[in-house]
Amino acid sequence: MQWVETEKIVRFNEVDEWGMAWYGHYMAWFEVGRLSLLRRFDLLPRQMVDMGYIAPVINLQCDFKSPVGSGDRIVIRTTVAKPEVAALTFKFEILLKENRTLIAQGETTQVLLTTNKKMIYRLSGEFEKRIRNLVDYCSQK
Amino acid sequence: MKKNKRNNELEEIVNNSEAMCEFLKKMIIETLKLENVTVGEIDSYVPLFRKGLGLDSIDALELVVAIEKIFNVIIEDEEVGKTAFASVDALSNFIQKKYKQG
């Protein structure tokens, strides 16, 4: 499985009263990872819209393994699971940069809709081609 | 040879509405790994989604893949799905029609 890595620094305003990054922010960090992966395959949300599609998240799961604090450097790793149906499942790992400690791991599932909110059961055309490139890249050993 | 026999068996099922409904109910239970649901408990005229059998959009995607694999019949999107998944009976009619065309 091929992962794409993105770095970021935990911001002061992402930390709660207990000095730990607040759990909700992890979802925004997943989004950073998702976008840096999608960018490589011309599948950014606006590019999807240009092709006539949107991809809302219908499921989200996250395990929090170890806390991080303000100023910590983290690495967001992202990949896509090989799909069996017309949906996209992204997998994420967040690591502490200095020693690669696993901070959190999770996944999201997105279904594919046309911009007029009609769910598609099968991919076709340019959209299918770009998604196939993304999946092929992520499935590499 | 084996493949032909399987095709003949499938054709027999497709040509018989009652056998087809039974087959589809089994397919739904197996594909979606429904627990505590038996073929006998599924009403052929009840909607598959939401208030009916209670299936969701990911279930629809899995059924679409199973139907394509077994019958080589394609359900492209929600709009076609609205007709096809209206009930087991509707799905049977939909597949019977498409199977003969294909």
Image (cartoon, coloured by chain):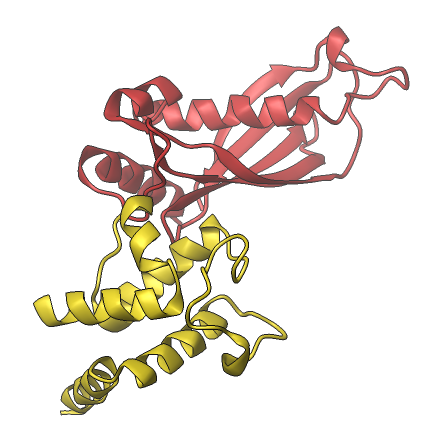
Chain colours: A red, B yellow
Q: B72 and A90: which one is in front?
A: B72
Judge whether A57 appears above or below A17 on screen.
below
- In this orientation, does residue A24 appear? yes
The residue drawn where x is 29% and y is 71% is B92
User: Among all residues in the image, which is located at the extreme right?
Assistant: A18
Q: Quadrant of residue B37?
A: bottom right
Judge whether B3 appears above or below A36 on screen.
below
Q: Position of residue B74 (x, y in %)?
A: 23, 58
Quadrant where the C terminus of chain B sits is bottom left
The residue drawn where x is 37% and y is 22% is A44
Tell me: A41 left or right of B5: right
Tell me: B98 left or right of B44: left
Q: A94 and A60: which one is in front?
A: A60
Tell me: A60 left or right of A65: left
For the image, the number of numbered tags is: 0
Q: Position of residue B58 (x, y in %)?
A: 46, 51
Q: Position of residue B87 (x, y in %)?
A: 39, 64
The residue drawn where x is 74% and y is 14% is A14
Judge whether A38 appears above or below A118 on screen.
above
Q: Position of residue A38 (x, y in %)?
A: 39, 27
Quadrant where the N terminus of chain B sits is bottom left
Q: B65 and B18: which one is in front?
A: B18
- In this orientation, does residue A84 appear? no
The residue drawn where x is 48% and y is 73% is B43
